[in-house]
Image (cartoon, grey):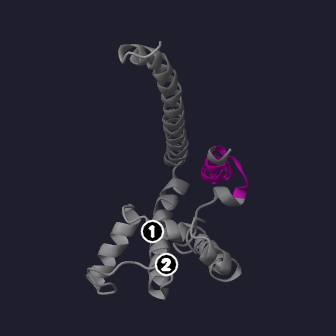
């Protein structure tokens, strides 16, 4: 159920925007207007609202719970703790280059500096992700291709997940039955009763 929910969360907005743009109301079918108008300013305001609500939830409302239970994963914790993720590596390299972090200094979950770095990086990442939206909004084929790409990646990742999970359970099932079949033979060869 969590994988289906993830597909819905990531695919549905793109599909809804595509339907609205190419088959929806007249306002959506018009041009984008000024550069910082409809396609950049409103999404940026929604992003800033989301970021403020995220910080309110994680740093105020649920702070005690999150401090108490380190096994609860938030996106911020995941990015800071997973030192192999590309975002973490890029942020660390950039911060070292800019003198924000020392070369041997690590990100710390409780540090205000770490929080500000990742809020800034998420903002820049969000702004970069807005750029394809401008081009997709003006071209039906590019927009359709983007939606199909998102769907294909969702199917690919879902298929890989299920193949990995089911192949491991299948492998474990037959390893257990294989070891049960070998046990009497091994016991007989060792001189035991078989």
Residue 53: quadrant of the picture: bottom right
Give the spatial CA distance, label 2 vs label 1: 8 Å
Above or below: residue 139 compared with residue 80: above
Q: Determine which residue is flagged by label 1.
A: 81
Q: Magenta: predominant secondary structure element?
A: helix
Decide if residue 139 is in sight here: yes
Q: Secondary structure at mark 1?
A: helix
State the image coordinates of residue 24 (x, y, percent, origin top left): 72, 51
Q: Secondary structure at mark 2?
A: loop
Decide if residue 45 is in sight here: no
First in residue order: circle 2 vs circle 1: 1
Q: Give the residue displayed 52% in from the left and 40% down from the top.
A: 161
Left or right: residue 61 compared with residue 154: right
Q: Nearer the viewer, residue 125 or 193?
A: 193
Q: Nearer the viewer, residue 9 or 179?
A: 179
Q: Determine which residue is flagged by label 2.
A: 109
Find out whether residue 7 is within the magenta segment: yes
Q: Residues within 10 Å of mark 1 (few under 14, many from 20)?
A: some
Above or below: residue 41 compared with residue 173: below
Left or right: residue 67 compared with residue 89: right
Q: Give the residue displayed 54% in from the left and 66% down from the top.
A: 75
State the image coordinates of residue 48 (x, y, percent, origin top left): 60, 77
State the image coordinates of residue 113 (x, y, percent, origin top left): 45, 86
Looking at the rendered structure, which numbered label has been put on residue 5? none
Q: Nearer the viewer, residue 170 or 153?
A: 170
Find out whether residue 143 is within the magenta segment: no
Above or below: residue 88 compared with residue 30: below
State the image coordinates of residue 92 (x, y, percent, origin top left): 34, 74
Q: Give the residue displayed 46% in from the left and 67% down from the top.
A: 79
Mark 2 vs 1: CB contact within 8 A: yes
Which range of residues does the magenta coloring cover?
Answer: 4-26
Q: Give the residue displayed 50% in from the left and 78% down from the top.
A: 119
């Amino acid at each position: 159920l969590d994988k289906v929910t993830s597909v819905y969360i990531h695919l549905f907005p793109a599909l809804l925007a595509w339907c609205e743009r190419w088959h929806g109301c007249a306002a959506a079918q018009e041009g984008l207007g000024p550069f910082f108008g409809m396609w950049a300013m409103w999404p940026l305001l929604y992003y800033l609202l989301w970021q403020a609500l995220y910080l309110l939830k994680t740093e105020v409302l649920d702070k005690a719970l999150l401090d108490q239970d380190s096994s609860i994963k938030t996106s911020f914790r995941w990015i800071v703790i997973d030192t192999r993720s590309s975002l973490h590596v890029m942020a660390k390299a950039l911060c070292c280059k800019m003198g924000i972090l020392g070369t041997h200094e690590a990100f710390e979950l409780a540090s205000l500096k770490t929080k500000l770095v990742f809020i800034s990086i998420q903002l820049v990442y969000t702004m970069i992700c807005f750029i394809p939206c401008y081009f997709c909004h003006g071209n039906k084929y590019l927009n359709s291709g983007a939606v199909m790409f998102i769907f294909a990646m969702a199917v690919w990742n879902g298929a890989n997940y299920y193949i990995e999970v089911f192949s491991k359970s299948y492998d474990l099932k037959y390893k257990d039955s294989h070891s049960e079949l070998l046990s009497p033979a091994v016991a007989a060869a060792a001189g035991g009763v078989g």
